Image (cartoon, helix red, strand yellow):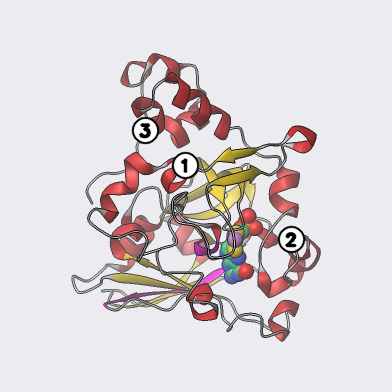
């Protein structure tokens, strides 16, 4: 792997402004802090003020439990998350069913503070706990022919009342290019605020890809397949004109039905104002290289 996330920064490793950030902010914001000027720094710091547990766990998208933002918090408790296992197959050396307990015993779970952004132009900052997807993929042994990673959510109509309606083609599926999947910003989250992930947020294990729109961050994952062809994704299947494979946060490319230039920060209350959306959700320095030379208006 080209580089790994580092958590053990010393004050002398970072800019003077960044020294005043706490460790949690450093984890999420270090790279942004070192490349931005102080104005950008102020914005980055502001953007990294975490949302409340209440906001994060009651304003959710999880169509398997209904299409309303408050439906998952009301209905997702019916999902049985223990025992849980993830099938990892396709172009890997060690395909099989990996129990969550076995996975966790081999992973270092870290706290990460990420700006999370949904496609409908709202954003939150979430203190996730999780591990790098790359570490999980390395557990299974990625073969050299693999180019993409496909993900699948559990599909259990008895536990997921929303799947009785054909709003999406169930199960929910997503995909990443292998280099996106191996990037150290890409994590599998198992908790938030140091507590186990609530069902409505994708328990017991969900993807988080902070430079992409929220729908890429597939919840309650039961299957991961390494492939050599680009996998289908639920929202692209539902509406290919509006949702592409990449779905990178990009204020310069509007969704056909709304502007993506600004966002409403959830939890801002009465004085909430729209903020300009940052390229790659503020992670440009870290991920722009993955898309060098690509026409982002075509690969949206
Ligand atoms: N299985 C599944 N995963 C999903 C979704 C979904 O409906 N089903 N919604 C996506 C969308 S559109 C968003 S914005 C995020 C929301 O995550 P959050 O509710 O934890 O903020 O989950 C994504 N993952
Ligand atoms: Mo979303």
The residue drawn where x is 35% and y is 21% is: 14
Q: Residue at x 72, y 54 (%)?
A: 59
* Front one among 249 and 256: 256
Q: Is residue 196 magenta?
A: no
Report whether 181 appears left or right of 144: right
Q: Is residue 76 above or below residue 293?
A: below
Q: Earlier in the sequence, mark 2 or mark 3?
A: 3
Q: CA distance from mark 2 to mark 1?
A: 24 Å
Report the front residue among 205 and 59. 59
Is residue 216 magenta-colored? Answer: yes
Label 2 lies in ligand 1 vicinity (Cβ under 8 Å): no
Residue 158's place in the image compared with 210, above or below, is below
Q: Quadrant of residue 40?
A: top left
**What residue is shown at x 32% (from left), y 21% (from top)?**
13
Which is nearer the N-term, disc 3 or disc 1? Answer: 3
Q: Is mark 3 within 8 Å of ligand 1?
A: no
Q: Is residue 92 visible?
A: yes
Q: Residues within 10 Å of mark 3 (few under 14, many from 20)?
A: some
Residue 245 falls left or right of residue 235: left
Q: Secondary structure at mark 2?
A: loop
Dividing the image into 4 quarters, which one contains the C terminus?
Answer: bottom left
| Image position, residue 291 (x, y; %) | 28, 55
Q: Nearer the viewer, mark 3 or mark 1?
A: 1
State if disc 1 and disc 2 touch (CB < 8 Å): no
Residue 69 image label: 2
Q: Answer whether labels 2 and 3 touch (C-beta < 8 Å).
A: no
Outermost residue on the left side: it is: 144
Q: Quadrant of residue 29?
A: top left
Residue beneath disc 3: 31
In the image, the segment drawn in magenta is 215-228
Q: Is 216 located above or below residue 39 in the figure?
A: below
Q: Which residue is mark 1?
A: 278
């Amino acid at each position: 792997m080209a580089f790994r996330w580092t958590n053990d920064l010393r004050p002398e490793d970072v800019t003077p402004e960044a020294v005043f950030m706490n460790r949690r902010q450093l984890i999420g914001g270090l790279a942004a802090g070192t490349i931005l000027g102080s104005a950008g720094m102020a914005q980055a710091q502001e953007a990294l003020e975490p949302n409340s547990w209440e906001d994060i766990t009651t304003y959710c998208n999880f169509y398997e439990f209904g299409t309303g933002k408050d439906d998952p918090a009301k209905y997702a408790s019916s999902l049985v998350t223990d025992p849980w296992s993830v099938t990892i197959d396709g172009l890997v050396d060690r395909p099989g069913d990996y129990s969550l307990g076995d996975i966790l015993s081999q992973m270092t779970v870290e706290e990460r503070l990420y700006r999370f952004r949904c496609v409908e132009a709202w954003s939150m900052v979430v203190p996730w706990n999780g591990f790098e997807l790359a570490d999980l993929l390395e557990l299974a042994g990625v073969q050299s022919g693999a180019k993409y990673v496909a993900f699948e959510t559990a599909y259990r109509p008895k536990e997921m009342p929303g799947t009785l309606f054909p709003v999406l083609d169930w199960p929910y599926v997503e995909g990443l290019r292998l280099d996106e999947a191996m990037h150290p910003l890409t994590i599998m989250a198992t908790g938030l605020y140091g507590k186990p992930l609530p069902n409505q947020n994708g328990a017991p294990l969900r993807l988080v890809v902070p430079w992409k729109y929220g729908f890429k961050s597939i919840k309650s994952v039961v299957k991961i397949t390494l492939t050599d062809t680009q996998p289908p994704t639920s929202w692209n299947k539902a509406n290919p004109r509006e949702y592409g494979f990449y779905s990178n946060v990009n204020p310069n490319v509007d969704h056909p039905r709304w502007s993506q230039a600004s966002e409403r920060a959830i939890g801002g209350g009465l004085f909430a104002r729209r903020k300009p959306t940052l390229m790659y959700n503020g992670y440009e320095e870290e991920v722009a290289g993955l898309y060098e030379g690509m026409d982002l208006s075509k690969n949206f």
